[in-house]
Amino acid sequence: MAAEAFLLLACYMAVLLVLAKPLGDYMTGLVQDRALPGTRGFENLIYRVCGASSDEMNWRQYLFAILFVNGTGIVFLFLVLFFQGALPLNPQNLPGLSWHLALNTAISFVTNTNWQAYAGESSISYFSEMVGLAVQNFLSAATGMAIVFALMRGFARHTTDKLGNAWRDLTRITLFVLLPLSLIMALFLVSQGVIQNFSPYVTLTTLEGVQQMLPMGPVASQEAIKMLGTNGGGLFNVNSAHPFENPTSLTNFIQMLSIFIIPAALCFTFGNVVRDRRQGHTLLWAMSIIFLVAAAVVMWAELSGNPHFTALGADSAINMEGKESRFGILNSSLFAVITTAASCGAVNAMHDSFTALGGMIPMWLMQLGEVVFGGVGAGLYGMLMNVLLAVFIAGLMIGRTPEYLGKKIGVQEMKMAAIYILITPSLVLLGTALMMMTEAGRAGIFNPGPHGFSEVLYAVSSAANNNGSAFGGVSANTPFWNLLLGSAMLFGRFLPFIPLMMIAGSLAERKIQPASPGTLPTQGPLFVSLIIGVVLLVGALTFIPALALGPVIEHLQMLGH
């Protein structure tokens, strides 16, 4: 089994890197504001129709444009979901969502979280899926990429306050990256048996003589951007464990690839934009090492299983609970690590049924800030904040002013980087405390003891870090839970944009200084180790006390201690 695990990981990383390199080179032109041949006229037409200026923006203007688009999206999606019963393409006559669930869902999809406190097949119409949720899947992914584009320009440009144009970035990312990739992905999924229709649900009689209703819908088109945009919200309650969403091992492998391909490609793009490809390779190495170790640990934990199984007479201790037999232990474990390392949240197995250690690693990957590849755009800008912290720590050790890519990192940048790093941990820990301290929060917890605490910690970690996956075991569709998790998603997504854009604007105004003999090299194995150390140290210091109250105690209980 160890050989199979090694082969799976090796094949996955090899295919990922082969595909990510050309995509990263292609996206370099978008960051550098080079229009694709023959598209400028079409772009200008879109800007004129929308009344959008194509002038370059400073960080405040860029941030305002991004927040305006997303704020409008929340209002629009809330109205679509709330008045769903009166809108077309609703063959099952599904009613509108309650106000608090509609608000939670609107925030969830606009923030790229896709937390779902509902069962898709019994709650959401085809119109709401396509005009509401799918549109935001594109826009939320484009938002993350636009922010990291602006940050890249901040590192690459000098003596200017301009970071590009948000309207142009959002348009080009959607039209020339997300739409083409989604079209290719959707056609592939249809060819493999993923459904794509607008038919009413089908009622049939099973071999046992029991009537069963099969949900239908435009699944392939939604599934494509769900994965490529690291969104994660599916049409069905069991997500990518459903055979209509993910029918074969091949579709499972391609879906895992599609989650990481844009985050990995952006590392190559970053190296190209700053004119030093080694910088992008360094970030990619740091992400890959953490990811591979995490995947190996989860696979080992699930294969080792639970010793109580054999004590109760089972043939094997391996943990197949909550997993699809067509995927097995290795593919389920790898999918869990990928979807939580990225801010995707799609699942092909029940994370709540993993062993204590196997479930803790996905939770911890989210708590690191989704920096191990992470969401489209979000993973790279999160990792770059850790890089600034690593450079600062190294500067303290050698007694020099920290520099990165030829620019001095001053007090302002370090304050903003520290604020960025503290935002989501604060939301997670405060949100979990509120859940456990209030009667309304505790009323939604189904399981007692450390596992119940783990489920709450996982839910708030998922919301604040814009992941969207869940352990389950909680009654999430209540006003208190919907509003608290909605607030965590909203603040976890948009508050970090402020320090990010301030850093981008400040760096763009700096001159690029030539390297000196005392300049710390920011590429190579030593700096990779420093980045990994900072990421792990911040994650460990912040969350080990909370994890000790949940999955660590569970693991010790499983071992009989």
Image (cartoon, rainbow, N blue to C red):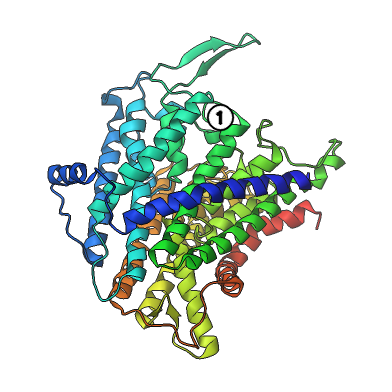
Q: 105 or 500, which lies in front?
A: 500
What percent of the width, then of the height, locates residue 387?
A: 48, 71
Q: Which residue is at 49% across, 61% downward?
A: 369
Residue that extends furthest to the bottom in the rendered view of this protein: 399
Query: Which quadrant would the N terminus be assigned to in this image?
Result: top right
What percent of the width, then of the height, locates residue 453?
A: 59, 54
Q: Which residue is at 31% across, 66% downward?
A: 501
Residue at which label 1 appears = 242
Can residue 443 be seen here?
A: no
Q: Secondary structure at mark 1?
A: loop
What percent of the width, then of the height, locates residue 353?
A: 66, 42
The count of marks equals: 1
What amino acid type is highlighted by mark number 1? His
What percent of the width, then of the height, locates residue 540?
A: 60, 68
**In this rendering, would 23 be left or right of 450?**
left
Using a 10 Å C-alpha cutoff, classify the residue at mark 1 as few (fewer than 14 neighbours), some (14 to 19) or many (20 or more).
some
Q: 366 or 436, which lies in front?
A: 366
Can residue 242 be seen here?
A: yes
**In this rendering, would 167 be left or right of 391?**
left
